[in-house]
Amino acid sequence: MQAAGRVQMAIDQWLLDQHCQGLHPPTLRFYTWLPAAISLGYHQRRFPEFWRQLTWQNQPIDLVQRPSGGRAVLHQGDLTYTLVTSDIPGNRMQAYQYLCEFLIRGWRSLGVDLQYGAAGRGYIHNPDCFGTATAADLVMPNGAKLIGSAQLRRGNTLLQQGSMRLNPDPGLFQQVFGGETAAIALPQHCSSAALIQKVSQALITSAESWFGIQLVSCPLSQAEWQTILPRVKP
């Protein structure tokens, strides 16, 4: 699904609220952002003022607050996933590793081996989520961070959001964060849309196998949209 970042975040927040109330089953969804956007972690209040004036392909870049934590993420040429579930055993890091296993297995099926990052708490001083790789993030053999994830817990319910860099624009990344991004070498023998479809399907298959479930596609109904859209922040 492709939509503006504020719409995507409103959907995720609604899914979390519904699951907390027992009104919606666990959910895995994939989406992209249009226009390009920078999402800020829930507790991230400081960011460069010039981010408010950024454009890409003649469109303003949105600034959006995520319900999950972490640092800023540039959403251009990426694929985002959201997991909403509950009753995940273990501590915070054990929950990350349990939920991220489907990502590792899915990407392995595409010929990409991933491992967890090793950065410490110093990441909080870097405004760029992809500038460091913590133990909750997944990196490629060359050290490039492919997937950054963040969580929000509400009681025994958990929202996990993550961004996968598929075809980022290095020039835009440098414009936003003032540095170079590590090279991402993925099997791209297809268009961007086809690559997104290929990755999504691999991860759906992996999630079904790892979690022992059968995922069912459930597009939002008109009534659900009417509940979600008033939540979209200006």
Image (cartoon, grey):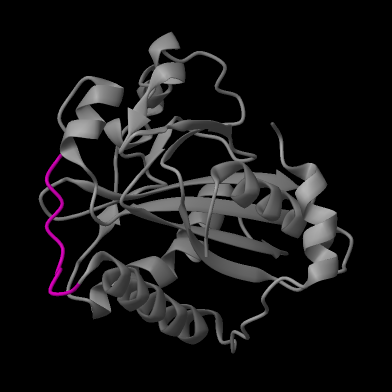
Q: Residue drawn 89% across and 60% down?
A: 21
Q: Which residue is situated farthest in the front direction here?
A: 58
Give x and y (percent) for residue 162.
46, 52
Above or below 100: residue 170:
above
Give x and y (percent) for residue 97.
46, 59
The one nearer the camera, 158 or 192, is: 192
Q: Quadrant of residue 231?
A: top right
Q: Quadrant of residue 125?
A: top left
Q: Residue drawn 39% across and 12% down?
A: 50
Above or below 232: residue 45:
above
Q: Which residues are magenta?
A: 181-190
Left or right relative to 208: residue 8: right
Give x and y (percent) for residue 138.
31, 52
Give x and y (percent) for residue 123.
37, 26
Q: Residue drawn 55% across and 22% down?
A: 44
Q: Residue drawn 76% across and 73% down?
A: 25
The one nearer the camera, 48 or 115, is: 48
Left or right relative to 41: residue 22: right
Q: Is residue 164 visible?
A: yes
Q: Quadrant of residue 76?
A: top left
The one nearer the camera, 160 or 116, is: 160
Instruction: Please give the count of numbered marks on the rendered protein.
Output: 0
Above or below 152: residue 3:
below
Q: Is residue 105 visible?
A: no
Principal secondary structure, stretch drawn in magenta: loop
Above or below 127: residue 207:
below
Left or right relative to 129: residue 207: right
The reply to whether the magenta stretch includes residue 4 is no
Query: Looking at the figure, which quarter contains the C terminus?
Result: top right
Left or right relative to 114: residue 49: right
